[in-house]
Amino acid sequence: MPKKVLLDVDPGVVDAFVICAAMYDPAVEIVAITSVGGSVPASVAAKNLQAVIEFIDPSRLPRIGMGGVADIDLPLDFGTLHGVDGLGGVQLPVAELRTQHPAEKVICDTIRNDPENVMVICMGPLTNIARAFARDPSLPGLVRHLYITGGSVAAKGNITPCAEFNFYADPAAAKTVLNAPCTKTIVPLDVTERLIFTLDDLDKLPDDENQLGKFYKNMSLPFFRSYRQKFGIEGIHIHDLISYMLATRPEYAITDEMACDVETIGQITRGMTVFDQRDKPEWNNNTEVVKTLKNEDEIIPNITTLLTAAANINAKKYSKENKEK
Protein backbone atom coordinates (compact mmCIF):
# COMPACT_ATOMS: atom_id res chain seq x y z
CA MET A 1 0.00 0.00 0.00
CA PRO A 2 1.41 3.44 -0.91
CA LYS A 3 2.58 5.60 1.98
CA LYS A 4 0.54 8.72 2.60
CA VAL A 5 2.90 11.68 2.38
CA LEU A 6 2.74 15.41 3.00
CA LEU A 7 5.57 17.34 1.32
CA ASP A 8 6.77 20.64 2.79
CA VAL A 9 8.91 22.27 0.10
CA ASP A 10 10.68 25.49 -0.90
CA PRO A 11 10.85 25.18 -4.73
CA GLY A 12 13.72 25.76 -5.83
CA VAL A 13 15.07 23.55 -8.62
CA VAL A 14 15.61 20.38 -6.62
CA ASP A 15 12.26 20.57 -4.84
CA ALA A 16 10.58 20.96 -8.25
CA PHE A 17 12.27 17.69 -9.24
CA VAL A 18 10.90 16.11 -6.05
CA ILE A 19 7.35 17.26 -6.80
CA CYS A 20 7.48 15.84 -10.33
CA ALA A 21 8.86 12.50 -9.13
CA ALA A 22 6.56 12.19 -6.13
CA MET A 23 3.33 12.89 -7.99
CA TYR A 24 3.94 9.82 -10.18
CA ASP A 25 5.73 7.61 -7.64
CA PRO A 26 3.75 4.38 -7.05
CA ALA A 27 5.33 4.05 -3.59
CA VAL A 28 3.48 7.09 -2.22
CA GLU A 29 0.19 8.92 -2.20
CA ILE A 30 0.83 12.66 -1.98
CA VAL A 31 -2.08 13.93 0.11
CA ALA A 32 -0.87 17.52 0.51
CA ILE A 33 2.01 19.83 -0.42
CA THR A 34 2.87 23.02 1.41
CA SER A 35 5.32 25.75 0.42
CA VAL A 36 7.76 27.53 2.70
CA GLY A 37 10.25 30.33 2.18
CA GLY A 38 13.81 29.08 1.92
CA SER A 39 15.67 28.60 -1.35
CA VAL A 40 13.42 31.39 -2.61
CA PRO A 41 11.25 33.92 -0.71
CA ALA A 42 7.93 32.64 0.63
CA SER A 43 5.87 34.41 -2.05
CA VAL A 44 7.98 32.91 -4.85
CA ALA A 45 7.88 29.45 -3.25
CA ALA A 46 4.07 29.60 -3.12
CA LYS A 47 3.85 30.66 -6.77
CA ASN A 48 6.34 27.99 -7.88
CA LEU A 49 4.50 25.22 -6.04
CA GLN A 50 1.25 26.06 -7.77
CA ALA A 51 2.99 26.51 -11.14
CA VAL A 52 4.71 23.11 -11.01
CA ILE A 53 1.50 21.33 -9.95
CA GLU A 54 -0.45 23.02 -12.76
CA PHE A 55 2.28 22.16 -15.26
CA ILE A 56 2.39 18.43 -14.53
CA ASP A 57 -1.41 18.34 -14.02
CA PRO A 58 -1.61 15.09 -12.02
CA SER A 59 -4.78 13.03 -12.19
CA ARG A 60 -5.24 13.43 -8.46
CA LEU A 61 -4.52 16.87 -7.06
CA PRO A 62 -3.10 17.13 -3.56
CA ARG A 63 -4.28 19.79 -1.18
CA ILE A 64 -1.99 22.83 -1.38
CA GLY A 65 -0.99 25.20 1.41
CA MET A 66 1.05 28.38 1.19
CA GLY A 67 3.53 29.34 3.91
CA GLY A 68 4.41 32.83 5.06
CA VAL A 69 7.76 34.34 5.93
CA ALA A 70 9.78 33.25 8.98
CA ASP A 71 9.49 35.21 12.21
CA ILE A 72 13.12 36.29 11.91
CA ASP A 73 14.70 38.20 9.05
CA LEU A 74 18.07 36.78 8.04
CA PRO A 75 20.27 38.16 5.24
CA LEU A 76 19.71 35.30 2.80
CA ASP A 77 21.03 35.66 -0.75
CA PHE A 78 18.10 34.56 -2.89
CA GLY A 79 18.60 33.86 -6.57
CA THR A 80 22.31 33.05 -6.52
CA LEU A 81 21.85 29.38 -7.44
CA HIS A 82 18.21 28.92 -8.41
CA GLY A 83 17.72 32.06 -10.52
CA VAL A 84 15.42 34.96 -9.73
CA ASP A 85 12.29 32.82 -10.17
CA GLY A 86 13.71 29.81 -8.35
CA LEU A 87 13.20 27.53 -11.36
CA GLY A 88 16.13 28.48 -13.55
CA GLY A 89 14.13 31.07 -15.49
CA VAL A 90 11.67 28.64 -17.14
CA GLN A 91 8.75 30.99 -16.36
CA LEU A 92 5.94 28.46 -16.03
CA PRO A 93 2.47 29.96 -16.56
CA VAL A 94 0.32 30.03 -13.45
CA ALA A 95 -3.12 31.29 -12.49
CA GLU A 96 -2.38 32.28 -8.91
CA LEU A 97 -5.04 31.33 -6.36
CA ARG A 98 -6.95 34.28 -4.95
CA THR A 99 -7.66 32.41 -1.74
CA GLN A 100 -4.56 30.69 -0.44
CA HIS A 101 -4.85 28.22 2.42
CA PRO A 102 -2.25 28.76 5.16
CA ALA A 103 0.35 25.99 5.19
CA GLU A 104 0.08 25.35 8.93
CA LYS A 105 -3.70 24.85 8.65
CA VAL A 106 -3.29 22.40 5.75
CA ILE A 107 -0.68 20.48 7.78
CA CYS A 108 -2.94 20.31 10.83
CA ASP A 109 -6.03 19.32 8.84
CA THR A 110 -4.20 16.66 6.81
CA ILE A 111 -2.72 14.95 9.85
CA ARG A 112 -5.91 15.31 11.91
CA ASN A 113 -7.95 13.72 9.11
CA ASP A 114 -5.75 10.61 9.12
CA PRO A 115 -3.92 10.45 12.46
CA GLU A 116 -0.74 8.36 12.74
CA ASN A 117 -0.87 7.55 9.03
CA VAL A 118 0.68 10.59 7.30
CA MET A 119 4.45 10.88 6.86
CA VAL A 120 5.74 14.45 6.56
CA ILE A 121 8.86 15.10 4.49
CA CYS A 122 10.38 18.54 5.15
CA MET A 123 12.68 19.92 2.46
CA GLY A 124 13.03 23.53 3.53
CA PRO A 125 13.17 25.55 6.74
CA LEU A 126 10.88 24.15 9.44
CA THR A 127 8.75 27.30 9.74
CA ASN A 128 5.49 25.64 8.71
CA ILE A 129 5.95 22.59 10.92
CA ALA A 130 6.74 24.68 14.01
CA ARG A 131 3.68 26.84 13.39
CA ALA A 132 1.47 23.77 12.92
CA PHE A 133 2.75 22.34 16.22
CA ALA A 134 2.05 25.67 17.94
CA ARG A 135 -1.44 25.80 16.42
CA ASP A 136 -2.23 22.25 17.59
CA PRO A 137 0.02 21.15 20.50
CA SER A 138 -1.22 17.55 20.27
CA LEU A 139 -0.28 17.29 16.59
CA PRO A 140 3.27 15.87 17.06
CA GLY A 141 1.80 12.69 18.55
CA LEU A 142 -0.39 12.21 15.47
CA VAL A 143 2.40 12.38 12.87
CA ARG A 144 3.42 8.98 11.53
CA HIS A 145 7.02 10.04 10.86
CA LEU A 146 8.77 13.34 10.23
CA TYR A 147 11.74 13.38 7.84
CA ILE A 148 13.86 16.52 7.98
CA THR A 149 16.40 17.63 5.39
CA GLY A 150 18.88 19.67 7.38
CA GLY A 151 21.62 19.98 9.92
CA SER A 152 25.13 18.61 10.04
CA VAL A 153 26.56 16.12 12.51
CA ALA A 154 30.17 17.09 11.79
CA ALA A 155 29.40 20.80 12.28
CA LYS A 156 30.23 21.64 8.66
CA GLY A 157 27.84 24.11 7.08
CA ASN A 158 26.82 25.10 3.57
CA ILE A 159 25.55 28.63 4.32
CA THR A 160 27.99 29.54 7.14
CA PRO A 161 31.07 27.60 8.29
CA CYS A 162 28.97 25.63 10.77
CA ALA A 163 25.30 25.98 9.76
CA GLU A 164 23.25 24.13 7.16
CA PHE A 165 20.92 26.36 5.14
CA ASN A 166 17.48 25.07 6.23
CA PHE A 167 18.29 25.33 9.94
CA TYR A 168 20.04 28.68 9.51
CA ALA A 169 17.02 30.16 7.71
CA ASP A 170 14.76 29.55 10.73
CA PRO A 171 16.74 28.20 13.70
CA ALA A 172 13.96 28.85 16.22
CA ALA A 173 11.57 26.68 14.20
CA ALA A 174 14.21 23.96 13.87
CA LYS A 175 14.75 23.98 17.64
CA THR A 176 11.00 23.72 18.27
CA VAL A 177 10.53 20.80 15.88
CA LEU A 178 13.58 18.85 17.02
CA ASN A 179 12.37 19.01 20.61
CA ALA A 180 8.77 18.07 19.73
CA PRO A 181 7.55 14.64 20.92
CA CYS A 182 7.22 12.92 17.56
CA THR A 183 9.05 10.23 15.60
CA LYS A 184 11.56 12.08 13.45
CA THR A 185 14.61 11.45 11.29
CA ILE A 186 17.22 14.03 10.27
CA VAL A 187 18.90 13.62 6.87
CA PRO A 188 22.02 15.82 7.37
CA LEU A 189 24.58 17.34 5.03
CA ASP A 190 27.03 14.59 6.02
CA VAL A 191 24.87 12.22 3.98
CA THR A 192 23.35 14.36 1.22
CA GLU A 193 26.69 15.89 0.15
CA ARG A 194 28.12 12.44 -0.50
CA LEU A 195 26.25 12.19 -3.80
CA ILE A 196 26.62 14.47 -6.82
CA PHE A 197 24.11 14.58 -9.69
CA THR A 198 26.11 15.12 -12.90
CA LEU A 199 25.38 16.20 -16.44
CA ASP A 200 25.74 12.54 -17.43
CA ASP A 201 22.89 11.76 -15.03
CA LEU A 202 20.83 14.58 -16.52
CA ASP A 203 21.44 13.19 -20.03
CA LYS A 204 19.80 9.92 -18.94
CA LEU A 205 16.48 11.72 -18.49
CA PRO A 206 13.99 12.01 -21.40
CA ASP A 207 14.89 14.41 -24.23
CA ASP A 208 13.28 17.68 -25.30
CA GLU A 209 10.44 15.92 -27.12
CA ASN A 210 9.11 14.89 -23.73
CA GLN A 211 7.33 17.71 -21.86
CA LEU A 212 8.73 16.92 -18.42
CA GLY A 213 12.11 15.95 -19.86
CA LYS A 214 12.37 19.38 -21.47
CA PHE A 215 11.33 21.03 -18.20
CA TYR A 216 13.97 19.08 -16.25
CA LYS A 217 16.76 20.26 -18.52
CA ASN A 218 15.64 23.86 -19.04
CA MET A 219 15.26 24.28 -15.29
CA SER A 220 18.45 22.56 -14.18
CA LEU A 221 21.09 23.63 -16.74
CA PRO A 222 21.37 27.15 -15.24
CA PHE A 223 21.60 25.46 -11.83
CA PHE A 224 24.57 23.40 -13.07
CA ARG A 225 26.24 26.57 -14.36
CA SER A 226 25.71 28.33 -11.02
CA TYR A 227 27.25 25.40 -9.15
CA ARG A 228 30.29 25.40 -11.40
CA GLN A 229 30.78 29.16 -11.03
CA LYS A 230 30.20 29.31 -7.26
CA PHE A 231 31.64 26.00 -6.05
CA GLY A 232 33.80 24.73 -8.90
CA ILE A 233 31.76 21.51 -9.00
CA GLU A 234 30.87 19.74 -12.25
CA GLY A 235 27.50 18.65 -10.91
CA ILE A 236 24.89 19.62 -8.34
CA HIS A 237 23.90 18.58 -4.85
CA ILE A 238 20.39 17.16 -4.74
CA HIS A 239 19.85 17.17 -0.98
CA ASP A 240 16.06 17.03 -1.11
CA LEU A 241 15.86 14.27 -3.74
CA ILE A 242 18.14 12.12 -1.59
CA SER A 243 16.06 12.91 1.49
CA TYR A 244 12.90 11.96 -0.41
CA MET A 245 14.46 8.65 -1.44
CA LEU A 246 15.54 7.83 2.11
CA ALA A 247 12.12 8.73 3.52
CA THR A 248 10.19 6.64 1.01
CA ARG A 249 12.79 3.86 0.69
CA PRO A 250 14.36 3.63 4.17
CA GLU A 251 16.32 0.51 3.23
CA TYR A 252 19.02 2.89 1.92
CA ALA A 253 19.54 4.56 5.31
CA ILE A 254 21.67 3.48 8.26
CA THR A 255 20.52 5.46 11.27
CA ASP A 256 21.37 6.07 14.91
CA GLU A 257 19.47 7.62 17.82
CA MET A 258 21.08 10.89 18.90
CA ALA A 259 20.52 13.92 21.11
CA CYS A 260 20.34 17.12 19.08
CA ASP A 261 19.63 20.81 19.61
CA VAL A 262 19.98 23.96 17.50
CA GLU A 263 21.83 27.19 18.31
CA THR A 264 19.46 30.13 17.81
CA ILE A 265 21.30 33.20 19.12
CA GLY A 266 25.01 32.73 18.45
CA GLN A 267 26.53 35.49 16.34
CA ILE A 268 28.76 33.00 14.52
CA THR A 269 26.98 29.72 15.19
CA ARG A 270 23.31 30.59 14.55
CA GLY A 271 21.56 27.59 12.99
CA MET A 272 24.29 25.15 13.98
CA THR A 273 23.07 21.68 14.98
CA VAL A 274 24.73 20.48 18.18
CA PHE A 275 24.80 16.76 18.98
CA ASP A 276 25.74 15.44 22.41
CA GLN A 277 28.48 13.00 21.39
CA ARG A 278 30.37 12.98 24.70
CA ASP A 279 31.57 9.67 26.13
CA LYS A 280 28.80 10.02 28.71
CA PRO A 281 26.05 12.09 27.06
CA GLU A 282 23.84 14.08 29.39
CA TRP A 283 21.14 14.97 26.88
CA ASN A 284 18.33 12.54 26.11
CA ASN A 285 18.10 11.18 22.57
CA ASN A 286 15.38 13.05 20.71
CA THR A 287 15.83 12.14 17.05
CA GLU A 288 17.02 9.50 14.64
CA VAL A 289 19.85 10.61 12.35
CA VAL A 290 20.93 9.09 9.05
CA LYS A 291 24.63 8.42 9.64
CA THR A 292 25.54 6.70 6.37
CA LEU A 293 24.05 5.13 3.26
CA LYS A 294 23.53 1.54 2.24
CA ASN A 295 23.99 0.58 -1.44
CA GLU A 296 24.98 4.18 -2.08
CA ASP A 297 25.77 3.62 -5.76
CA GLU A 298 22.12 2.66 -6.45
CA ILE A 299 20.53 5.87 -5.21
CA ILE A 300 21.16 8.30 -8.08
CA PRO A 301 20.37 5.69 -10.78
CA ASN A 302 17.08 5.03 -8.98
CA ILE A 303 16.39 8.76 -8.83
CA THR A 304 16.89 9.04 -12.60
CA THR A 305 14.63 6.02 -13.08
CA LEU A 306 11.93 7.65 -10.95
CA LEU A 307 12.18 10.97 -12.83
CA THR A 308 12.12 9.18 -16.18
CA ALA A 309 9.06 7.16 -15.21
CA ALA A 310 7.28 10.36 -14.13
CA ALA A 311 8.09 12.03 -17.45
CA ASN A 312 6.90 9.04 -19.49
CA ILE A 313 3.65 8.67 -17.53
CA ASN A 314 3.01 12.38 -17.93
CA ALA A 315 3.68 12.12 -21.69
CA LYS A 316 1.22 9.23 -22.08
CA LYS A 317 -1.40 11.18 -20.16
CA TYR A 318 -1.07 14.19 -22.44
CA SER A 319 -1.06 12.02 -25.56
CA LYS A 320 -4.30 10.33 -24.48
CA GLU A 321 -5.94 13.65 -23.67
CA ASN A 322 -4.98 15.12 -27.06
CA LYS A 323 -6.41 12.08 -28.90
CA GLU A 324 -9.70 12.46 -27.04
CA LYS A 325 -10.06 16.12 -28.07
Image (tube, rainbow, N blue to C red):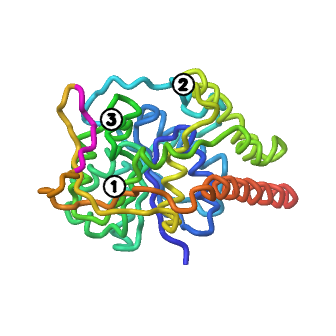
Q: Position of residue 227 (x, y in %)?
A: 58, 28
Does residue 273 belong to the magenta stretch? yes
Q: Is residue 30 left or right of residue 110?
A: right
Magenta residue span: 268-275
Instruction: Point out the residue furthest to the bottom here.
Output: 1
275 versus 208 height, above or below:
below
Residue kind at label 3, given as amino acid type: Ala
Mark 3, Cα crowd under 10 Å, few <14 / some 14-19 / many 20+, is: many
At x 74%, y 60%, the residue is 313
> Which of label 2 and label 1 is nearer to you?
2
Residue kind at label 2, given as amino acid type: Val
Instruction: Point out the residue furthest to the front here.
Output: 279
How far is disc 2 from disc 3 in space, using C-alphas?
24 Å
At x 35%, y 39%, the residue is 68
Please tell me whether mark 2 sits on a helix, a strand or a loop. Answer: loop
- The reply to whether callout 2 and callout 3 are in contact (CB within 8 Å) is no
Q: Position of residue 72 (x, y in %)?
A: 25, 32
| Mark drawn on residue 84 | 2
How far is disc 2 from disc 1 in space, using C-alphas?
28 Å
| Mark drawn on residue 105 | 1
Q: Position of residue 200 (x, y in %)?
A: 73, 41
Of the image marks 2 and 3, the number of the one nearer the N terminus: 2
Please tell me whether mark 3 sits on a helix, a strand or a loop. Answer: loop
Residue tagged by mark 3?
A: 163
Of the image marks 3 and 1, the number of the one nearer the N terminus: 1
Image quadrant assignment for residue 228? top right
Quadrant in the picture for the C terminus? bottom right
Quadrant in the picture for the N terminus? bottom right
Q: Is residue 86 left or right of residue 209?
A: left
| Nearest the eye: 292 or 325 | 292
